[in-house]
């Protein structure tokens, strides 16, 4: 989710956190990203940025269809997953796993794609239905029909716009 939400739109227009290496460094320093990487530092370099952009597009394709990813989306996510693997190990604390990637620059992209693979219900990742909105959310509603990333923000704006449109026609 964090990778998908590196693009957003506000009153100033569209933004992309991964447009620059500074933005990449900010994203990599985020607590949920650090946790997903298991505390392993990733370089904030051009290779990491390119791998993340590839993974973000693959994930966006994978979550675009409400019925599940299309074959091209599956291939795109698998192309990212091909650059890493988990290996079972025995440590002094007991059984564990170690992530191995082709290069350190693949770790964030591979981890993001692997998170999608590990989700029990990936079809619950949705794009916000707000106009000109690009954020994604995980739908935890009971019947799986949530439409907005925030009911108090986007949902409320949409309801207010519909109300205004109905009353403006009268």
Image (cartoon, grey):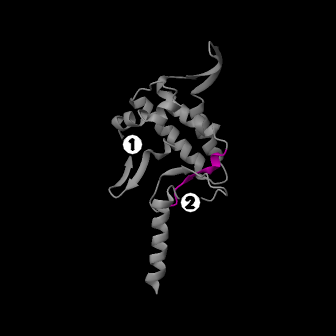
Q: Residue furthest front?
A: 93
Left/right placement of residue 169 relative to residue 146 reads left
Where residue 147 appears, as percent x and y from the top left, is 56, 60
Where residue 90 appears, as percent x and y from the top left, is 65, 14
Who's the residue at 67% across and 42% down the image?
Answer: 120
Q: Which residues are magenta?
A: 121-130
Instruction: Kindly report which numbered mark, 2 or 1, lies closer to the viewer in this rendering.
Output: 2
Where residue 32 appears, as percent x and y from the top left, is 49, 36
Verify whether residue 123 appears in magenta: yes
Left/right placement of residue 12 relative to residue 38 reads left
C-beta proximity under 8 Å, tags 2 and 1 = no
Residue 69 in view here: no
Tell me which corner region of the image, top left, top right, bottom left or bottom right, holds residue 101: top right
- Tell me the element at label 2: loop
Q: Is residue 49 above or below residue 154?
A: above
Where residue 163 appears, as percent x and y from the top left, is 48, 76
**Residue under circle 2?**
147
Q: Is residue 23 above or below residue 152?
A: above
**Residue under circle 1?**
17
- Using a 10 Å C-alpha cutoff, classify the residue at mark 2 as few (fewer than 14 neighbours), some (14 to 19) or many (20 or more): some
Who's the residue at 50% across and 31% down the image?
Answer: 35
Give the alpha-carbon distance from disc 2 to disc 1, as whole Å: 24 Å
Who's the residue at 43% across and 82% down the image?
Answer: 168
Left/right placement of residue 59 relative to residue 48 reads right
């Amino acid at each position: 989710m964090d990778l998908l939400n590196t693009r957003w739109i506000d009153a100033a227009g569209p933004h992309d956190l991964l447009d620059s290496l500074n933005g990449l460094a900010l994203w990599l320093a985020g607590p949920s990203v650090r946790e997903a990487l298991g505390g392993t530092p990733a370089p904030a370099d051009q290779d990491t940025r390119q791998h993340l952009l590839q993974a973000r597009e693959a994930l966006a394709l994978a979550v675009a269809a409400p019925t599940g990813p299309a074959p091209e989306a599956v291939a795109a996510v698998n192309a990212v997953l091909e650059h890493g693997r988990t290996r079972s190990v025995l440590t002094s604390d007991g059984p564990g796993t170690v992530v191995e990637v082709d290069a350190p620059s693949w770790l964030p992209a591979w981890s993001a794609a692997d998170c999608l693979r590990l989700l029990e219900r990936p079809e619950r990742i949705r794009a916000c239905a707000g106009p000109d909105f690009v954020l994604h959310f995980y739908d935890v509603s009971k019947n799986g029909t949530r439409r907005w990333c925030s009911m108090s923000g986007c949902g409320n704006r949409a309801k207010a716009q519909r109300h205004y449109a109905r009353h403006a026609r009268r």
